[in-house]
């Protein structure tokens, strides 16, 4: 399954998600001045406040935006000027903290790392951007989901350096090549874009998911670490790496450009090599 | 209301908070309260490096590092603290390596080091390679490594808990710290944490400015909470503007780029830093580079259609260096400005970056309530604290160092204090302050929008209190901030719900920002000299006779519009006499 196929699947959910209500601009007082060169975007957001709502619904907002704006700017515009109850997480605003993973036009992205111009269909004319929470984790409020199951899987793979030997007085020596061996997987910001784009994770939440495996990989292939066996045992579990069907959704989704599926393959190979 | 009792409570889970937690958690019953998930903290955004005189690639020693830190801070640094930081830097880096941090390596497999602004060999002779780094995601690796080790040690986190008040109990010899009050984002419930010691590690307040490298969540809550208790904040007028923010956006491009050889140029392609700092040029400290850039633009030599930025030229570094040593910033330029640093120079302009000032502490991370006395049980570390190791201007890579050295010290001190003392009763009605604050924000008493006030605050701070300041601009800023505070009394919060009410918390955060902006401007007005990051056009020289001293700002009276009283604290000297700062 590819990322665009995932988006088709989400379009089906849309129809079952009830009403599509358009919210007139100005519900929170006057609007800030529209910058020169702005176009009007229809931002269609899947809303669900578990405190008051029985089921999710779609709501659309008209938002002026520059092509170079981040999707996060659109969400802020809605929250700050149209509807203060819209809820999502964000912090760094430049793709480094991992707070704002969401499904944008059916694909998992960080809202702060995707620009309006990259989402506009042909020639930059006004268009609709659809935003939903990431899938597979319980929704708490609008775009904000329960991250606990995700972090639980991360913690389960012993994501820390384990070394049983005597600590040297200076640093441990590691060759540049050994350091390079696990460089890719050190980039992970735990945003969950990968895990929540994984069709296996959607259907079987007990699967560790790609992010946890990426973080296990980061230590299994670190020459300073001595607990590869322990982690491989954990990942050999029924909910471990063998669940992965190599569909590459996770790799396409990763905002850090990590070769997620490749890392999973390397863990699988390590298991086969050691066990078979 | 829910009640919890711990030995130590740490507020904040960035680098400083988690480094403290690792120490404290192994000694005493510890809880970490954090408004963000730990790995979302802005320490993760730090790029270039963390310095220590390891001398892995060339001769270096911690005394040179101490000197650079003091000179870089324009002699407002407390020299005993700087010496401790430079000395303990070496173990701080080695500790992180042992915890698993994947530093870049030299061909011999040692931790690699690179050049950074203001770090020199032998008291200013030439730039020295002192910054330990992991590509251009050093902060990310520090944050991840510390979180991994918290997982390893089973540290207890209360994620998405917003601390809004600290509890002080009047004792025989003055106030004692007895707890903290937090708002749980998920439920809207108020939690009281009684503890023997509390460590504040809540980070900076860059969001008082519009153009900033700081996260949306860096709103200075910890500093604001402490200030509201009548405790002082130190040197708040010293705010650092980092030279190389992406023009118009403020997203940071690390100084490590210049450490690897990138060059700043004006519109005509001139390497203008040769004129301002002939010896170390582009690697002069940040205050000097930021002012030089601003001058180039003011004098009409800026680049671009509006001549309002300069250019960071990395093109001669080659794709290989950019992709391997500076991959993240290369991607930032591509993603957010559609500029490819491999082939084109990148538009840059100074961006509000770092608070040198903060909650005053001594070298044991104990919080001061005046120039001499501490509040027993109250600690602070990291960007929210002021030890003061950065003085009037922080050197690059010294903050990641600060959070590790003083985070560790705070964790140990807080735990040891807790082990040696009993719990003291918390004050009666511990939730009163927070309940009233939130009720006021939620009540219907006006229609001012949080976003409008915040945007106007940031606009006036950018225009009037940034790289260059004058009496006139600062008075304008003060007038604007005070007017905005009046309007803040009439804000309306639209979300009245209990669950995940971020609308309410943005309003609370704005309250802190307004207060901190006023302190910054008040301190800047009173400091009629130019020193480090504080540059007064009307007082262009450093004035050691009148201003070689820390500012201490106290709140006078109750409520948001209360007055600020300024006092002063002497600088600690050990062996370095102030000299003119030339590079
Ligand atoms: C883009 C960028 C690049 C940088 N690069 C470098 C570099 O290369 N080298 C260097 O030395 N320095 C660098 N710095 C500076 C350095 O990264 C920071 O000063 C440092 O990381 C601050 O760490 P901290 O632990 O004090 O705060 P943070 O990491 O900001 O953590 C603050 C913590 O406090 C919590 N918190 C805040 N308010 C509350 C509240 N009310 N209740 C509960 N919790 C709260 C937050 O959840 C968070 O966990 C950089 C800074 C930036 C912005
Ligand atoms: S490659 Fe494996 S882990 Fe990644 S999305 Fe596909 S099944 Fe899931
Ligand atoms: S591997 Fe990539 S997508 Fe997955 S959590 Fe890490 S950074 Fe996010
Ligand atoms: S807000 Fe930090 S990754 Fe998007």
Image: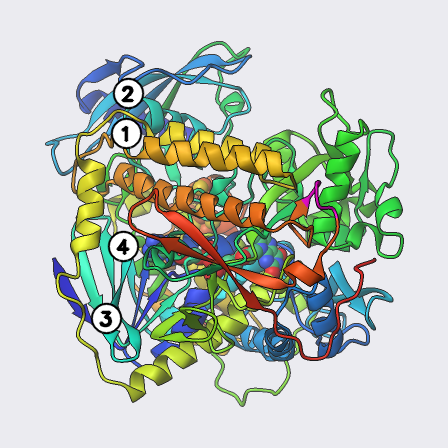
Q: What residue would you read off at disc 4?
A: A149
Does residue B182 sit above or below A18 in this rendering?
below
For marks 4 and 3, give the CA distance: 39 Å
Q: Alpha carbon of mark 2 to alpha carbon of mark 4: how far?
A: 36 Å
Q: Which residues are magenta?
A: B536-540
Give the chain of mark 2.
A
Q: Between residue A1 and residue B484, name the one nearer to us.
A: B484
Look at 32% across and 21% down and name the residue there.
Answer: A44
Labelled pair 1, 2 in contact (Cβ < 8 Å):
yes
Distance in Å between CA atoms under marks 1 and 3: 37 Å
Which labelled disc corresponds to residue B169? 3
Using the image, determine if residue A270 lies above or below residue B481: below
Would you identify the image quadrant in which residue A141 lies?
Answer: top left
Q: Of discs 2 and 4, which sits in the foreground? A: 2
Image check: B424 left or right of A77?
left
Side of B85 where B159 appears, left or right? left
Residue B133 x %, y %: 65, 63
- Cα–Cα gap, marks 1 and 4: 28 Å
Mark 2 Cα shell of 10 Å, populated few (<14), some (14-19), many (≥20): some
Q: Say which of B171 and B202 sits in front.
A: B171
The C terminus of chain B lies in quadrant:
bottom right
Work out which quarter of the rendered image holds the N terminus of chain B and state it: bottom left
- Give the chain letter at badge 3: B
């Amino acid at each position: 399954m590819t990322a665009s196929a995932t988006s088709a699947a989400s379009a089906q959910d849309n129809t079952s998600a009830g009403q599509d209500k358009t919210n007139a601009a100005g519900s929170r007082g006057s609007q800030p001045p529209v910058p020169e060169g702005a176009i009007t975007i229809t931002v269609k957001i899947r809303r669900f406040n578990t405190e008051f709502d029985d089921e999710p619904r779609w709501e659309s907002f008209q938002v002026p935006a520059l092509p170079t704006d981040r999707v996060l700017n659109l969400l802020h515009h809605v929250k700050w000027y149209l509807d203060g109850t819209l809820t999502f997480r964000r912090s760094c605003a430049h793709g480094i903290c991992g707070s704002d993973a969401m499904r944008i036009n059916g694909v998992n992205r960080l809202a702060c790392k995707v620009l309006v111009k990259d989402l506009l269909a042909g020639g930059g004319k006004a268009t609709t951007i659809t935003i939903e929470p990431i899938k597979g984790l319980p929704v708490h409020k609008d775009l904000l989901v329960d991250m606990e199951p995700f972090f639980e899987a991360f913690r389960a793979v012993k994501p820390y350096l384990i070394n049983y030997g005597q600590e040297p007085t200076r640093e441990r020596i590691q060759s540049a090549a050994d350091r390079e061996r696990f460089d890719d997987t050190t980039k992970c910001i735990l945003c969950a874009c990968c895990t929540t784009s994984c069709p296996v994770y959607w259907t079987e939440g007990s699967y560790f998911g790609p992010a946890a495996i990426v973080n296990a990989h980061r230590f299994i292939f670190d020459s300073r670490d001595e607990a590869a066996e322990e982690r491989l045992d954990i990942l050999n579990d029924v909910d471990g790496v063998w669940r992965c069907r190599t569909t590459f959704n996770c790799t396409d989704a990763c905002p850090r450009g990590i070769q997620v599926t490749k890392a999973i393959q390397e863990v699988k190979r390590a298991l086969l090599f050691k066990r078979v | 209301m829910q009640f919890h009792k711990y030995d130590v409570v740490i507020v904040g889970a960035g680098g400083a908070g988690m480094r403290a937690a690792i120490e404290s958690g192994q000694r005493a019953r510890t809880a970490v309260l954090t408004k963000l998930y730990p790995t979302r903290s802005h320490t993760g955004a730090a790029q270039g490096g963390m310095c220590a005189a390891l001398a892995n690639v060339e001769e270096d020693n911690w005394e040179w590092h101490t000197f650079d830190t003091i000179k870089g801070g324009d002699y407002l640094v407390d020299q005993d603290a700087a010496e401790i930081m430079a000395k303990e830097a070496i173990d701080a880096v080695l500790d992180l390596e042992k915890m698993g941090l994947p530093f870049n390596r030299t061909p011999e497999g040692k931790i690699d080091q690179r050049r950074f602004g203001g770090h020199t060999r032998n008291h200013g002779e030439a730039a020295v390679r002192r910054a330990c780094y992991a590509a251009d995601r050093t902060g990310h690796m520090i944050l991840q490594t510390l979180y991994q080790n918290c997982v390893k040690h089973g540290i207890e986190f209360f994620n998405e808990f917003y601390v809004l008040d600290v509890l002080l109990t009047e004792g025989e010899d003055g106030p004692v710290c007895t707890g903290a009050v937090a708002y749980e984002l998920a439920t809207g419930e108020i939690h009281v944490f009684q503890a023997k010691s509390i460590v504040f590690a809540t980070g900076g307040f860059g969001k008082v400015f519009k153009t900033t490298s700081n996260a949306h969540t860096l709103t200075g809550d910890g500093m604001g909470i402490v200030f509201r208790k009548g405790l002082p904040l130190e040197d708040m007028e010293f705010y650092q503007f980092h030279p190389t923010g992406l023009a118009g956006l403020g997203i940071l491009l690390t100084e490590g780029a210049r450490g690897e050889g990138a060059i700043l140029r004006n519109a005509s392609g001139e390497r203008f830093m040769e004129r301002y700092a002939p010896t170390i040029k582009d690697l002069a400290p940040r205050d000097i580079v930021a002012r030089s850039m601003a001058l180039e633009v003011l004098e009409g030599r800026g680049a671009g259609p509006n001549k309002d930025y300069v250019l960071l030229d990395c093109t001669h570094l080659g794709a290989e260096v950019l992709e391997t040593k500076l991959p993240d910033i290369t991607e930032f330029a591509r993603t957010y400005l559609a500029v490819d640093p491999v082939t084109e120079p990148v538009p840059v302009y100074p961006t509000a970056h770092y608070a040198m000032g903060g909650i005053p502490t001594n070298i044991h991370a104990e919080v001061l309530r005046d120039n001499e006395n501490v509040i027993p049980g109250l600690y602070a570390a990291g960007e929210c604290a002021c030890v003061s190791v950065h003085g009037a201007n922080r050197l690059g890579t010294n903050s990641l160092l600060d959070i590790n050295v003083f985070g560790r010290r705070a964790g140990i001190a807080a735990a040891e204090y807790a082990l040696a003392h009993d719990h003291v009763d918390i004050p009666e009605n511990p939730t009163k302050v927070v309940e009233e604050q939130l009720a006021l924000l939620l009540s219907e008493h006006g229609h001012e929008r949080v976003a409008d006030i915040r945007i106007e605050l940031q606009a006036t701070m950018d225009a009037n209190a940034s790289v260059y300041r004058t009496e006139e601009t600062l008075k304008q800023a003060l007038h604007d901030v005070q007017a905005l505070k009046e309007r803040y009394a009439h804000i309306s919060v639209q979300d009245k719900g209990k669950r995940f009410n971020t609308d309410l918390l943005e309003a609370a955060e704005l309250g802190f920002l307004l207060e901190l902006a006023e302190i910054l401007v008040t301190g800047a007005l009173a400091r009629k000299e130019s020193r480090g990051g504080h540059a007064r056009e009307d007082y262009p020289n450093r004035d050691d006779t009148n201003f070689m001293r820390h500012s201490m700002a106290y709140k006078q009276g109750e409520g948001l519009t209360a007055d600020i009283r300024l006092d002063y604290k002497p600088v600690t000297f050990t062996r370095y006499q102030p000299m003119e700062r030339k590079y």
